Image (tube, helix red, strand yellow):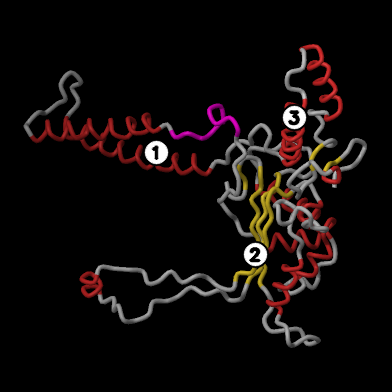
């Protein structure tokens, strides 16, 4: 299914950028204004070069974004001519000296890609399947969250795009992004931890091959027997000529059905992994760091002291609580207390 895999929506939108420049600032085109607005976006504090930056990415203001990216696509990339054997080109009248048509975009586009939990409310279980209306509802909920958490930045960027002039609310922005929505089948991540027990949609290749090849082989055998004068199939008593025709026909039908099954099997979204939602990922990062420090500090303790220390660790960090004592989005480490969502504090 497009857009959905492993419990996540892989959102792609394309917003056409206006041509020319605004009348009040004719020196700067709309395309350049988009680039300037994107350049102003703070980078997430997720690398040694940015960990001390004062500002964090605006996409880190909510618990929806596993990944988010915006960029300007000026035009399609020309990959060269569609090659053809020179002799065949000569015979078919394909003149190699004549330029082939080149795909071009009708305008530069603002591309927005995001990988988000396919839920309408943070904390809801990740789905395996979504109907088209349900997928639309998830995209709309995400768009409303973006508007509520980073309206200023969104206006700064999208005000240079077609159709954005009438966007004045979260609902308007959700409708706008839906008009710009492009289906995608390319996941952006993989959180699976237990590959052996994951419910992948493995293709039953051997049964499919046997089911297709068996009637074809039987039909071929019946044809050979008919060519050598045998009127019926031994032990079965079936006439060889009709048996050959029906077997080959059955094999072709089964081959078509097998191909359709393989395609539909590949199109089915994977089930979400056990800890695939963003709150679980952030909690996992937090516990990983804190438990590593606990391990270092408590090596060599007697069993009773180690047991007591571990009890204190669990009481302090609450591994089962995804809403508190967890790492905030957009940061690389929980070492800084400001990067931690503390108890009795709503996540940001």
Which element is circle 2 on? strand
User: Mark 3 sits on what residue?
Assistant: 291
Question: Which percent across, then down, holds residue 73?
Answer: 60, 69
Residue occupying the point 76% across, 84% down: 22
Is label 3 in contact with label 2 (beta carbons under 8 Å)? Answer: no
Q: Which residue is more in the foreground, 288 or 151?
A: 288
**Does 200 sit above or below residue 337?**
above
Assign the magenta stretch its main secondary structure: loop
Residue situated in front as seen by the camera: 288 or 243: 288
Q: Where is residue 174 in the image (x, y as percent from the top left)?
A: 76, 58
Magenta residues (range) = 193-203
What crowding class fits label 3: few (fewer than 14 Cα within 10 Å), some (14-19), or many (20 or more)?
Answer: some
Which of the two labelled residues, at mark 3 and mark 2, occupies the earlier sequence position? 2
User: Reading the chain from its start, which is encountered first: label 2 or label 1?
Assistant: 2
Residue at 75% over, 40% down? 282
Question: Picture quarter containing residue 150?
Answer: bottom right
Residue 222 place in picture, x, y as percent: 17, 31
Closer to the observer: label 2 or label 1? 2
- The residue to which callout 1 is attached is 258
- Which residue in the protein does label 2 denote? 111
- Foreground pick, 341 / 210: 341
Horizontal relation, residue 190 to residue 95: left or right? right
Mark 3 and mark 1: Cα distance apart in space:
50 Å
Along the horizontal axis of the image, is 276 left or right of 206?
A: right
């Amino acid at each position: 299914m497009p857009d959905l895999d492993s419990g996540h929506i892989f959102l792609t939108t394309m917003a056409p950028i206006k041509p020319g420049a605004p009348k009040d600032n004719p020196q700067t085109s709309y395309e350049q204004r988009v680039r300037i607005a994107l350049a102003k976006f703070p980078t997430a504090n997720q690398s040694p070069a940015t960990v001390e930056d004062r500002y964090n990415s605006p996409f880190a203001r909510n618990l929806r974004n596993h990944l988010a990216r915006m960029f300007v696509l000026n035009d399609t990339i020309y990959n060269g001519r569609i090659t053809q054997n020179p002799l065949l080109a000569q015979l078919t009248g394909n003149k190699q000296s004549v330029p082939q048509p080149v795909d071009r975009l009708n305008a530069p586009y603002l591309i927005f890609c995001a990988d988000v939990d396919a839920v309408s409310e943070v904390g809801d279980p990740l789905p395996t399947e979504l109907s088209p209306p349900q997928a639309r509802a998830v995209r709309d909920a995400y768009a409303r969250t973006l508007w509520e958490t980073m309206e200023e930045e969104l206006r700064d960027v999208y005000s240079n795009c077609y159709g954005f002039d009438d966007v004045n609310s979260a609902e308007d922005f959700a409708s706008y992004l839906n008009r710009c929505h492009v289906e995608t089948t390319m996941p952006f991540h993989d959180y699976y931890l237990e590959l052996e027990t994951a419910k992948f949609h493995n293709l039953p290749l051997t049964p499919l091959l046997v089911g297709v090849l068996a009637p074809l082989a039987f039909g071929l055998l019946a044809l050979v027997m008919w060519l050598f004068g045998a009127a019926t199939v031994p032990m079965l008593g079936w006439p060889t000529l009709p048996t050959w025709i029906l077997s080959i026909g059955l094999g072709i039908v089964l081959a078509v059905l097998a191909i359709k099954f393989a395609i539909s099997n590949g199109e089915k979204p994977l089930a979400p992994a056990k800890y695939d939602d963003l709150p679980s990922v952030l909690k996992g990062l937090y516990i990983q760091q804190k438990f590593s420090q606990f391990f270092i500090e408590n090596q060599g303790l007697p069993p009773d002291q180690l047991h007591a220390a571990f009890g204190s660790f669990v009481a302090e960090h609450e591994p089962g609580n995804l809403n508190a004592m967890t790492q905030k989005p957009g940061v690389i480490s929980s070492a800084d207390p400001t990067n931690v969502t503390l108890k009795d504090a709503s996540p940001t």
